[in-house]
Amino acid sequence: MSDAARTIGFIGLGKMGSPMARLLINGGHRVLGFDLAEDALSHLTEAGGTAVHSAGDAAAADLVVLMLPDSDVVTSVLHDDAVVAALAPGSVVIDMSSSEPMRTRELAADLARRGIHLVDAPVSGGVRGAEAGKLTIMVGGDADVVAGITPVLELLGRPVHAGDVGAGHAVKALNNLMSATHLWVTSEVMIAGQRFGLDPEVMLSVFNGSSGRSGSTENKWPNFILPGGFDSGFGLRLMLKDMKIATGLARAVGVEPTLGDEAVELWARAAGELDATADHTEVARWIASAGH
Ligand code: NAD
């Protein structure tokens, strides 16, 4: 679907934000991008975007996309005085980060008092999905506002309207708790099978035609773990953050996340021993290492 050219502010040009901003530029939009990292700004300029040097300058647009690490950073950016001054009534902020749904609702209520709409639109599909414009985008917000930004989101992938504001962040975190839990058990299974003498390619081929199939058997093990790259582009700590959001949400609505809590504990142990920048697929190597 095409859309008239717009000026879009884009804050957070990291592993995901950088290719996403490029797709918006290629879609004919003017992108004003900001990131704390200088090299992220250079990549934006090379892609044809306009690098600005503060979040306030990027917020001088009627549509502002955030692709930041977590709710703490999203909140600090949206409370920045220059950002507050730049966001005009009627403008739309899309938080595409994987943030905390309860905090997203609070921020939306704050912004609504100033006539600004907040839509949450976190994504699944990883860096490859971001590069190819094939993300699944989980959207939470007012239906009319969501309809107005859908042509922009369609440049990035497939938007699914999950419900009111916060719904996107909720379904994203819940998805990642499942994803992390099955990556862990898939890794245990793959390592055990190989030590028994099974060929890992044969195992994946069987699992992918059987009931053990998942994103871990279809994507993560064949593409990032078996080849030994551990380079999905999604950080282990970001995964752990999402898992904690999901278990917190479950608890808040009266569901005891027994297995989820166990998974959080296991991932936290791995995170405590691995480098701060480790890719989340590194858990497979950690599980395989002696003593675990
Ligand atoms: P990243 O760490 O590569 O990028 C985050 C960027 O935000 C960095 O470039 C950082 O410099 C910038 N930043 C931090 N604080 C800032 C501030 N105050 N102002 C401006 N810029 C600031 O992370 P990522 O992998 O791109 O993930 C971004 C979000 O998307 C996270 O919420 C993550 O959970 C989610 N996500 C990531 C993936 C993935 O595969 N990497 C997939 C789905 C969702």
Image (cartoon, rainbow, N blue to C red):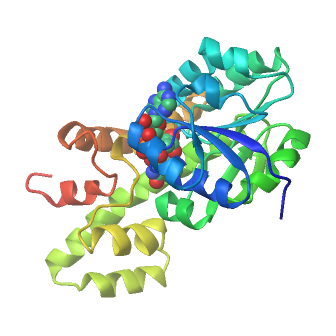
Residue that protrudes farthest toward the left in the picture: 290
Q: Nearer the viewer, residue 213 or 72?
A: 72
* Residue 178 appears left or right of 289: right
Q: Is residue 259 shown to the viewer in this render? A: no
- Compared to residue 133, the image places residue 257 above or below, namely above
Which of 211 and 239 lies nearest the eye of the viewer?
A: 239
Residue at the (35%, 65%) spot, across then down: 186
Q: Indicate the quadrant where residue 134 lies.
A: bottom right
Residue extending farthest to the right is 144
Is the N terminus in the top left, top right, bottom left or bottom right quadrant?
bottom right
Residue 14, position as x, y percentages in the image = 46, 45
Report the side of 273 relative to 277 (left or right).
left
Q: Is residue 219 above or below residue 149?
A: below
Q: Residue at x 80, y 22 (%)?
A: 88
Q: Position of residue 105 (x, y in %)?
A: 71, 25
| Residue drawn where x is 21% and y is 70% of the image | 192
Q: Position of residue 284 (x, y in %)?
A: 26, 60
| For residue 213, above or below residue 247 | below
Q: Residue furthest top?
A: 81
The answer to whether residue 45 is seen in the rendering is yes
> Does 113 sit above or below residue 168?
above
Count of numbered circles on the image: 0
Please tell me in which quadrant of the rendered image residue 104 appears. Answer: top right
